[in-house]
Amino acid sequence: MYLIRMKNCAFFARHGVLDEEERLGQRFYVDAELTVEPDRPLDDDSMQSTVDYGVAYQVIEKIITGQRRFLIEALAQEVGRALAARFPQIRRAEITVRKPNAPVPGVLDYVEVTVVWPG
């Protein structure tokens, strides 16, 4: 087994509980740490034995830029499920979603959640 890490995938989307979050939108950042068990030995040097991270990025993008969610937790969970469904080689997916402009009464860099699949 080995890990594939995708860091700071950035997307513009309209998630959140408040109407202003839907109206204005904001940038969201996603990290995906994927534990992969290849279908074939890595010595084969074959894309079919691993996770194509270009396709994985597209899976993440479709979810993050798609249907509005109130919770970034729900987004992270959906990303993990979708990646595991698309790539059966994934044994574990740790998905982190960051929301830099969370509407909180204070100063912070971002709010983030991490969901592990299977959970």
Image (spheres, rainbow, N blue to C red):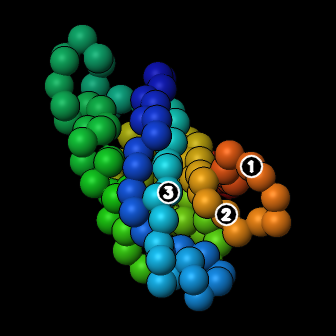
Identify the disc placed on residue 108: 1
Give whichever of discs 3 and 2 has the lower sequence position: 3
Q: Mark 3 vs mark 1: which is more N-terminal?
A: 3
Q: Please state which of residues 78 and 20 is positioned toward the viewer in this rendering.
A: 20
At x 48%, y 84%, the residue is: 23
Front of the two marks 3 and 1:
1
Query: Type of residue at label 2?
Result: Ala
Packing grade of label 3 (10 A; few <14, some 14-19, many >=20) is: many
Question: Can residue 99 be seen?
Answer: yes
Residue 102, compared with residue 33, is above or below; it is below
- Cα separation, mark 2 vs mark 1, equals 9 Å
N-terminal of the pair, mark 2 or mark 1, is 2
Residue 34 shows in this picture: no
Horizontal arrangement in the rendering, residue 21 relative to residue 86 (left or right): right
Which amino acid does the dot numbered 3 rest on?
Answer: Phe
Which residue is located at x 61 percent, y 65 percent?
72
Name the secondary structure under disc 1: loop
Give the amino acid type for the residue marked by disc 1 in the picture: Leu
Query: Which residue is painted at 54% across and 65% down in the image?
Result: 75
Query: Which secondary structure, mark 3?
Result: strand
Residue highlighted by disc 3: 28
The residue to which callout 2 is attached is 102
Q: Place residue 41 in its image quadrant.
A: top left
Q: CA distance from mark 3 to mark 2?
A: 10 Å
User: Residue most toward the top?
Assistant: 43
The percent position of residue 101, horizontal first and vertical second, equals 61, 60
The residue most toward the bottom is 19
Asked if disc 2 and disc 1 are in contact, CB closer than 8 Å, the reply is yes
x, y percentage for residue 112?
A: 67, 51
Looking at the rendered image, the quarter that the C terminus falls into is bottom right
State the SS at label 2: loop
Q: Is residue 58 left or right of residue 100?
A: left
